[in-house]
Image (spheres, rainbow, N blue to C red):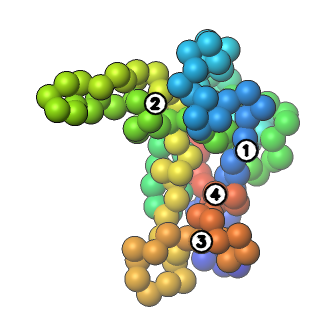
Amino acid sequence: SMRERFTEQDWPLTMSSYKSNLMSSMSIAASRLRQVHPHNPISLNKEDAAKLGIANGDRIEVSTPGAKLQGVALVRSGIAQGALAIEYGYGHKQLGAAIHTVDGKPMAHNPQHGNGVNLNALGFADPTRPAKDNVWIDWVSGAVVRQGLPVKVRKV
């Protein structure tokens, strides 16, 4: 059980991801869609946010046992208490966000492709495996665990 290893006392919230009805990891390159939905805020339950002194639009830091990142809080009632949610498909480090040079010529790039936070950055090694370079894998799907990660949040 995840909670046997990562207690609620140390990691009081769980994180899940969700897919947008508008954006995807590839459509971040569409400037018109970015005008409508330019970044992915980190959604928090209203009661949890109030306990943490976090208001809508505050800069917050989300930490897992393996990493941390900063983003913008979106306080709403559509998130279960004790959880936070991050929309998938933002915070690219590549996909046109970074400058690359080919044959001495800079390729087209746009730093806005890196808008928002990349929830994959919050992953960590499987604590049950002897080698600490194994990512935590969902044993049912075989994908990297992105649902139910133990997290804590603080206002920056």
Name the residue that disc number 4 marks: 146
Q: Distance between the residues labelled 2 and 1?
A: 18 Å
In the image, 55 versus 116, the foreground residue is 116
Kindly identify the residue that appears in the image at 63 percent across and 65 percent down: 143
Name the residue that disc number 3 marks: 137
Residue type marked 2: Gly
Kindly identify the residue that appears in the image at 59 percent across and 71 percent down: 137
Q: In which quarter of the image is residue 148?
A: bottom right
Q: Distance between the residues labelled 3 and 4?
A: 9 Å
In the image, 116 versus 107, the foreground residue is 107
Q: How crowded is mark 1: few (under 14 residues within 10 Å), some or many (20 or more)?
A: few
Q: How many labels does the image show?
A: 4
In the image, 25 versus 7, the foreground residue is 25
* Secondary-structure class at tag 1: strand
Which callout, 1 or 3, points at the residue further toward the start of the chain? Answer: 1
Q: In which quarter of the image is residue 132?
A: bottom left
Q: How far apart are marks 1 and 3 (CA)?
A: 18 Å
> Do the numbered discs 3 and 4 sit on residues whose CB atoms are within 8 Å?
no
> Visible in this render: residue 155?
no
Kindly identify the residue that appears in the image at 19 percent across and 25 percent down: 105
Q: Considering only vertical position in the picture, is 48 above or below 146?
A: above
Which callout, 4 or 2, points at the residue further toward the start of the chain? Answer: 2
The image shows residue 56 at horizontal and vertical percentages of 68, 23
